[in-house]
Every structure is written in C-alpha cells, then in structure tokens.
Amino acid sequence: MSVKDLNEVKKEKVAAGKNTFFQVLIGADEGPNFAMRRFIIEPGGSMPRHTNLVEHEQFVLRGKAKVGIGDQVYEMSANKVVYIPAGIPHWYETKGDEPFEFLCIIPNKPDKIEIMDS
Amino acid sequence: MSVKDLNEVKKEKVAAGKNTFFQVLIGADEGPNFAMRRFIIEPGGSMPRHTNLVEHEQFVLRGKAKVGIGDQVYEMSANKVVYIPAGIPHWYETKGDEPFEFLCIIPNKPDKIEIMDS
C-alpha cells in the first residue's frame, strides 16, 4: 500500500525525447500487473515516431500537443483518454508554452522502444 | 486505437456508493491487460469500507476526500498517487463542496466487491 504526491517522485530524462521527462509513479516493483508513469514534455519538446512492444493507456493531465497515432494526427489536451495498441507507431509534439503532461500505463511485460525517424 | 474525451464517456451509478458514479474510459474489451476507469464521488458522497479481489492503481484528479486504506486514514487531494493491494479494505468520504474524482486502474481479472460495513 502506498500514497505519494506526484511532485515527490523522482523525474528522469527520456533519452529518446527532446525536453521530455518521466516519473514512475507505481512501478513493477510495487504493482504486480501494470505500471503507472507520468510523462512531461516541456514547451518545444517532442518524442519521435516510435513503436513499443506493449500497449499504452494514457490520460492527458494538462497542456496541448499534436500526437500522431498510426496514420492519424490528433490535437490533444486535458481530459483526453488515449489507447495505443502494442506495435502502433506514435509521436508527440507540444503546442504552446505549457508543458504537455500525461499518465501512461503499461503492462509489466518486456518492452522495447524502436525509433522510426532519424 | 482510440482517442476519447472524458466528458463523452457514459457515466453510471456505483451501486455500493452514495452519490458515486463511474466511467469505463478504456475497458477490457479494448485494453488486453487492464482497464482505466474514472470515479466521481459528489459532495456528501462516500464509498463504504470494502475489499476487492484485484489491486487498484489510482490517481486523484480533483477534489478532496478522507480515504481509509487498511488501518490508515489519508487526506487526499489532486495529484496523489495511490496503490491499494488486492484484498486490503478501503473506503472514501468526500470533503468540501467539490466532487472527488480519481482514475482507478485494475487488471482484467475476476473481481468481487465485498462490503465490510452495514
């Protein structure tokens, strides 16, 4: 059992992203089946087009971004709920001068990120 | 793949709760491993002390509540991250005049709610 404040959890840089950080809010060491993370893409930041071996269930907390999923591009903002199946290419580009923040939940299964753009 | 707005998703009453509603944001029909739901406990609302067969990973979106987990009572507010293991008794009581809203993610496994208070 645990109760944490979002702002007390360690923030790390996402190697594949530009101005992108993440926090493991509930990790595989704690939750037996899935992990809850928060991603923060600072203004001007982005994540390149990539695939993962695991699905993503995401919830947008704040900010705005253009998000590509498969062949579609979406204008994302707070309160959007996003399901990205395993293996589907996706990318992120912030809009405006606010960080784009979202929760991203993944199963506790082997994952591998594959970058599709150079 | 799907993108939804939180406010477009059907809201249903939680039978065991008082003034409590929920939405299935990403259900077992869509996500293969876990389901994302939002709970809304309106002012004056509550959920009685109960157990589930599955763990909960929760994220508080807005509002305030007293939340009991095991033998502890917590003052909850936005940005709190909560992990409740399977089988641990928990309950909710809103505080103030704002709805208490949180995401609650559970694995796609058989669940059963058992109410502990009359």
Image (tube, coloured by chain):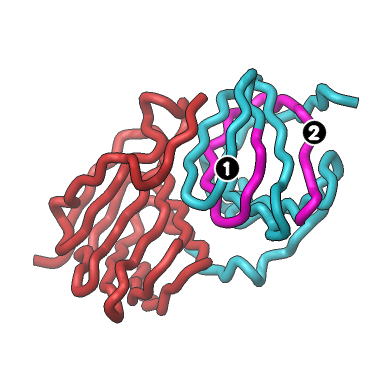
Chain colours: A cyan, B red
Q: Main secondary structure of the magenta part?
A: strand
What label does residue A49 carry, if any?
none
Q: Is residue A90 positioned above or below B84 on the image?
A: above
Kindly tell me whether residue B52 is visible in this rendering: yes
Please state the horizontal and vertical placement of residue B23, each as a whole percent of the image.
30, 45
In front: A81, or B8? Answer: B8
The chain identifier of the residue carrying mark 1 reads A
Q: Amino acid at mark 2?
A: Pro
Q: Is residue A21 above or below residue A65?
A: below
Name the residue: 44% across, 73% down.
B77
Numbered badge on residue A76? 1
Q: Earlier in the sequence, mark 1 or mark 2?
A: 2
Residue assigned mark 2? A48
Q: Nearer the viewer, residue A9 or B1?
A: B1
Q: Is residue A35 visible?
A: no
Q: Residue furthest left?
A: B118
Mark 1: amino acid: Met
Residue A2: x and y in percent read 51, 65
Quadrant in the rendering for residue A48: top right
Q: Residue at x 46, y 26 (%)?
A: B32
